[in-house]
Amino acid sequence: MRVRFGVDVIDEHEIPSTVAVFTENVGGCAREFAITAMRLSSQNENVKSYYFSVTDAVEEVKDKISLTFPKENPESVLENVEIVSFAEAYFEKSAIPMRWIGGKEMLESMRERRGIMVEIINAFDNIEENSFIFFDSLTDLVRLVGFEIKWRDLIDFIKGLKKVCKRKESIVAFHYSKLPNERENELLDQFDIVVDFELSYERGEMRRWMYIRKFSGLMPFIERSGISRFEVKLDPFVGAVISRVHRVI
């Protein structure tokens, strides 16, 4: 599938339809990288781009996307991107009043609500073929484990989503903020693509790094290139940019 990540060693190949996850520590810019990839992919008329948000309302997502490209025209950035919000379903059983999320709730719409996982599954059922979907975020779903979601159901959801992606020739990229959880390895192992983003301070300078931990189908090409890590910078016009690569000599 011809999606673009803005990384030469990846973009020169066709990425298999699958489920990916971009992980980060705070400030690692995984979300900005995913939004940039979503925008680059939406420029291909054969690719449909979606932004699925678990906790943000549609207007909040628009602001988040626009802030990733503060020097660009907001309308051009949002063009060809469909935003789907699950915020009302997510906060329905929380202590947060629903008027904070989407205005005053009607009793009838509350009756029709069927739970967040049903809402998410229905949304994936309705995606078009050849789609790139950024899912923000996997962390929010993990927080529901033990309350509204069983751990096994979350793992099975990802396994099932792979099959949907193959059938619809699409790619889903999840955002994930690292959590101190012993089950994390089992969770991340379900993905065919795992990319880590890290914020570090070196000799008093702040730097962001990207590491490709797993990339089914492309890993032999990435390893043959000898690249060990990518430096990522944020540009006000184009979002997340790979500024240079570090090769293994």
Image: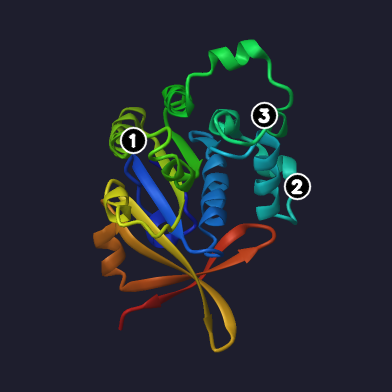
Sort mark 3 into few (<14), some (14-19) or many (20+) by Cα contacts within 10 Å: some
* Label 2 Cα neighbours within 10 Å, binned few <14 / some 14-19 / many ≥20: few
- Residue 185 visible in the picture: yes
The residue that mark 3 highlights is 98
State the SS at label 3.
Answer: helix
- The disc, 2 or 3, on the residue closer to the chain's N-terminal end is 2
The residue drawn where x is 55% and y is 61% is 29
The residue drawn where x is 39% and y is 35% is: 170
Above or below for 162 versus 10 = above
Instruction: Please tell me which residue lies in front, 243 or 63.
Output: 63
Identity, as a three-letter code, of the amino acid under mark 1 = Lys
The residue that disc 1 covers is 150
Comparing marks 2 and 3, which lies closer to the viewer? 3
Residue beneath disc 2: 73
Q: Is residue 104 above or below residue 249?
A: above
How far from the left and from the top, in percent, is residue 195? Answer: 39, 58
Marks 3 and 1, the one that precedes in the sequence: 3
In front: 174, or 5? 174
> Residue 85 appears at what percent x and percent y?
58, 32
SS for callout 2: loop
